[in-house]
Amino acid sequence: MTTVPLAIDAPAIDYALLSPMLVVFGVAVLSVLVEAVLAVAPGVTGAPAATVARARHRIQVSLAIAALVIAFIRVVILATGMPTDAAATMSGAVVIDGPTLFLQGTILLVSLAAVAFMAERRLDRVWAPVEVRTAAGRRMAVVSGGGADADLPADAFTPSAATIPDSPDELLAARAHAVTTEVFPLTLFAVGGMMLFGACGDLLTMFVALEVLSLPLYLLCGLARRRRLLSQEAALKYFLLGAFASAIFLFGSAFAYGATGSLNLGMIGHSLPAGSGASGAHDAAGGSADHTLALIAVVGVSVGLLFKVGAVPFGSWVPDVYQGAPTPVTALMASATKVAAFGALLRVLHVGFAGLADDWRPALWAVAIATMVIATLMAVTQQDIKRMLAYSSVGHVGFALVGAITLTEAGISSTLFYVAAYAFAAFGGFALLSVVRDETGVEESRLDAWAGLGRRRPLVGVLLSLVVLSLARMPQTRGLIRELAGVAAAGATGAWALVIVGVLCSAVAAYFYVRVIVSMFFAPSPDDAPEVLTPSALTTVPIGVCAAVTAFVGVFPQPVLDLASSASAFLR
């Protein structure tokens, strides 16, 4: 008896649609190869270690910037040249529609700024002695970089992640011009995962994207050059809580498969009853999914996504991680990661589980209200600007959820506009913190230390004032515009409780934002006032672009609102 093998149809893959992500992932792999080859170059070629380190740094930065620029160009081409409004590829695992391209473009722009910020080597200076005592107890002479103790240029990342923080071995690595260029391929992998996260058409692919974007961030959070113990603590907290959130997400995905027989979000949406309520009554147009299993599924998946966006009570990690991580990584997480996470959350709620909206909407209302209230109250008590911006980030998640909960295209467009606007303002705020240093060269973010800084360095004061006014939603800043867009979408569906709480929290939040401005321009400078350093173009250009975008969109918001509105239709 002859056995006929079963024919397996390979999924059709449209590489043109996937090209932005393929470029980022491809260059990330190439960067890993560069890292491996140039790591052994001194022993092979005889070139000085400093020369090889500088060459590796330049190559890695160039590759990362080129990848992000090419990927952004491809996103623009896809957005302007697609014959149809949306398309799915890889058997529906990846969906390229309006929200996907809008979010990918935003992610790439802020990630480009983050990569340039990571490459900055003018703000940090590291004193490295000529002779150090190693962990083994013997003294070792280091002759590279001159014959005397030196004040060496450095970036924000430790030169040797395997050493004990502030140990002689770490000083030895600094003196030997070691550079942690691994951060650039790690960042590219994280950015590729972010781009895929909001484009996923099924929950299994979304889980893979979640891990691809999260694992590099866990590592990056623990690589700070300064205050490395705090940085390592932040990385450990983020990793442990992130592992639990990923497990809960996967648990919810399993129940989604049990309820509907599919992990595809479109098929899940068609399997759920249209408009089923808590009683479990099915609409005539609905499907045959198990209602109880579907409820467990939406809870598990939502918890995993709410952790990633940083909503209360799942965002308790945000202040500690944002404060402990290297500032360029914090800026990336506060901007690009939030954009990607909201893209995934919107797709899950609007495409996969819209039929259970009567069940999950009250719970998300409670989450949004708790996020706005608790984050606002906690931010009021902060005396550290970096930690205050972290709580502000959590608070803005609550405001963005107001539009996300609204199952209308107006709600989608308002959320897209909100997260894109917030991404640029948040990045600018965290980047500005890096230029203010105390006498030892460590970032100074204590509010009392910033007293009088606006009078001594008006440009820094004006730029930070513009950012915080935008975050405070003041008139003529895009902060007010983005909140009005969300309020309009929520009010149109009768969610006035969210609107009222949001307005009240905005009034309270104005206090701690304006307090920063008052301290910078009207308070007397302390005796140990920090120094404002002048960064290179790698930092000044991203800060300037973020400030310019904030000011421009505050005065002329309509083009971006129209772009978000035209990109608000999901492929279902």
Image: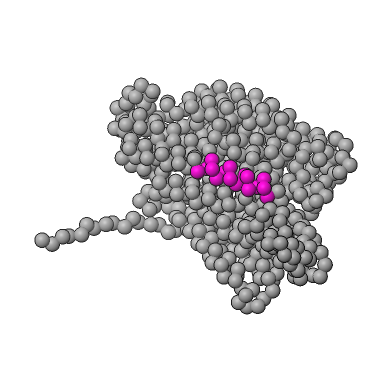
At x 55%, y 39%, the residue is 309
**Going by the image, does 11 lie left or right of 556?**
left
Spot the residue most to the front: 137
Give 225 or 338, whichever is nearer the viewer: 225
Q: Which color scheme did the rendering employ for the protein?
A: one colour
Residue 201, relative to residue 519: is it above or below? below
Give 46 or 53, whichever is nearer the viewer: 46
* Residue 374 in view (yes/no): yes
Residue 422, relative to residue 36: is it above or below? above
| Region of the chain picked out in magenta, as a range | 228-243
Q: For the N terminus, give its image quadrant.
A: bottom left
Query: Does the stretch in magenta take in 448?
Result: no
Residue 127, relative to residue 320: is it above or below? below
Looking at the picture, how far across and down is residue 216, in whole percent? 55, 52
Query: Does the stretch in magenta take in 229?
Result: yes
At x 68%, y 53%, the residue is 165
* Residue 267 in view (yes/no): no
At x 54%, y 43%, the residue is 240
Picture quadrant of residue 464: top right
Looking at the picture, how far across and down is residue 95, in whole percent? 42, 48
* Predominant secondary structure, magenta span: helix
**Going by the image, does 134 lie left or right of 289?**
right
Residue 509, relative to residue 57: is it above or below? above
Looking at the picture, how far across and down is residue 443, in whole percent? 75, 47
At x 76%, y 58%, the residue is 126
**Going by the image, does 502 lie left or right of 413?**
right
Give 288 or 132, whichever is nearer the viewer: 132
Looking at the picture, how far across and down is residue 513, in whole percent? 73, 34
